[in-house]
Amino acid sequence: MMKVPAYAAPSATDVLAPFEIERRQVGPHDVLIDIEYCGVCHSDIHFVRNEWGNAVYPAVPGHEIIGRVEKLGTEVTSFKKGELVGVGCMVDSCQNCEACAEHLEQYCENGSTATYGSPDPHLGGHTFGGYSGKIVVSDKFVLHVSEKLDTKAVAPLLCAGITTYSPLRKWNVKKGDKVGVIGLGGLGHMGIKLAHAMGAHVVMITRSAGKGNDARQLGADEVLISKDPKAMERHRNSFDFLLNTIPVGHDMNPYVSLLKRDATMVIVGAVEPLDPLHGGGLIMQRKRIAGSLIGGIQETQEMLDFCAEHNIVSDVEMITIQEINKAYERVVSADVKYRFVIDMKSLKTRSS
Amino acid sequence: MMKVPAYAAPSATDVLAPFEIERRQVGPHDVLIDIEYCGVCHSDIHFVRNEWGNAVYPAVPGHEIIGRVEKLGTEVTSFKKGELVGVGCMVDSCQNCEACAEHLEQYCENGSTATYGSPDPHLGGHTFGGYSGKIVVSDKFVLHVSEKLDTKAVAPLLCAGITTYSPLRKWNVKKGDKVGVIGLGGLGHMGIKLAHAMGAHVVMITRSAGKGNDARQLGADEVLISKDPKAMERHRNSFDFLLNTIPVGHDMNPYVSLLKRDATMVIVGAVEPLDPLHGGGLIMQRKRIAGSLIGGIQETQEMLDFCAEHNIVSDVEMITIQEINKAYERVVSADVKYRFVIDMKSLKTRSS
């Protein structure tokens, strides 16, 4: 085992503070990564504050990790020392079930190992995430990252990027489709960029007229204000696909009314109870609602390659690790365009 | 126009009583049907009592109509005088939109004409349904009915049959699939019979253990009591498809937990607000919820032919038209196995 500096919450009531954690030695199929950047996902906050009831302490969050290969296990052939790599929301899965066989490790029937807070199959205890100097990850869960993009802005692709890319692909969004992206935050801003790059006619759907200009700059062709009943009526039964990124419970009925017959709204943000849905809204035009969780490793690589090809990164605001607690407050009040990324040099400076 | 005897509710507070209504003359593409039987659907009750807020009076309900061709329009070639025919929930649609072109008249973009209570494009006023001596219907909306089945028990296929058949086909239920039918009423009992005939492993899902024997006799391979948490846990993530026939708002979360990854629960009964759905239940295994409304005319004919081939009819209790108000009370208290059918001779006797 090796000791590495990290930023952890020792308990649900503590803020994040410097901490030393133990990482496993580099096994034959492992990659040791020197972390350069880590994105700040809303899930990190839910987790360290135990808002989903699944926290374990000390909690080291972070699952949008970019770094360089420092050391390779003896059996690793697909990575090179010094290579730019990424790690997302998972670091292991059973590799043995139907979901894993279909490259859908996020739906592993025996439970994938989350980058932080999952039982650690190697060391016991639980896994520690990317607010850390280094991380050791099985090579199957390490992604190749292009050098041609702005590296620090690539970090959020590992969660916000794949969370929005996967349903757009799964529901076959294509050139000319009318796609609505509901909610303009970390997920929503990636949804706009990706749907736009896939050739869709993208409509940003938001409660706040003030977000219109930003949405257009990100690639939206239209902006639909969900509080405007006349505008909502004009777009009724017209969308081929809706990507719902709202991160909290809400009334889905007005959005369902926007779908065409047989079209789907996919929920990627609201891991909580939603307001009462009217059965008639689904029945009358055979409409559908579905959920989607990040994406598999193969698809995450495909997404990173797609972003490199289309020159897509996240819009980020850089912070030092010492600013993390303030950043959390700003995420909660939706005061960030659109993702905080931690420069991990700040951790190393402080703790060396 | 011709005057025909009917049973109608003159207003929301009136019970059904004898009434004379006007039918249009038989146009070149019309079929005049002498009605023999009409099924009693829960929608009839919602309508005449204006529980969905869409009633118009006098209201003549009934959209599970079986009768014999009495007269044919000059241009009608596909039916013969004296032939046994059926009419379901629709009597017209625009024939001009994308939905109609796909044989999905129930989703007609310009609004299909319901068998009762829709604006009548021929006479003005609104359409009158099957609690009536005769009906005039455009030949495109008349179905061929096999003589080999028990005619009176065929009537409910026109609504309860197609409502359950269509989603089973649309979601491609096939031999060996594990299919759950939720709720054992008019729709549910048809769902069991049809899914069984398609070769599925059918699980009846009900709150009442007392319904188990009946469900097995209808063709269910297993019965799952939804109030038994251990049984529900054993069936978790195991269903290829769920057909939810519950006719009122309810908590969908326990049923969503039964679905496999990527599997769908289709709602056909609850045209009202459902209890709060947890987003996580859909997200974690990419599960889906959809609605489905009856079926198109072509598919309704396919369903009738399928039922003739597999010797499937509804389980019915026969009533006279004079017993209709009592029958309504019994439908509301779920005291019928599983569908009332009115013998229309009783109407003709009384009013002649």
Image (cartoon, coloured by chain):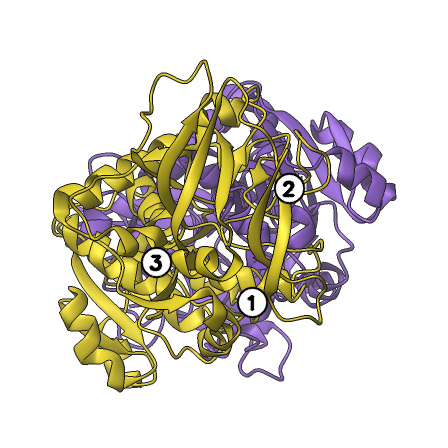
Chain colours: A purple, B yellow
Disc assigned to residue B274:
1
Q: Please report, as a chain letter, where disc 3 is located.
A: B
Residue A229 position by quadrant? top right
Residue placed under numbered mark 3 in the picture: B243
Disc 3 to disc 1, C-alpha distance: 16 Å
Residue located beneath label 2 in the image: B22
Do the residues indicated by labels 3 and 2 lie within the same chain of the protein?
yes
User: Would you say the residues marked 3 and 2 are in contact, meaning their CB atoms lie under 8 Å apart?
Assistant: no
Q: Quick one: B101 or B348, which is closer to the camera?
A: B348
In contact (CB < 8 Å): disc 3 and disc 1: no
Q: Residue furthest front?
A: B352
Residue A226: x percent and y percent? 78, 46
Q: Position of residue B132 (x, y in %)?
A: 51, 51
Q: Is residue A262 visible?
A: no
Dot 2 lies on which element?
strand
Does residue B172 lie above or below B287 as drawn? above
Query: Label 3: few (<14), some or many (≥20) within 10 Å?
Result: many
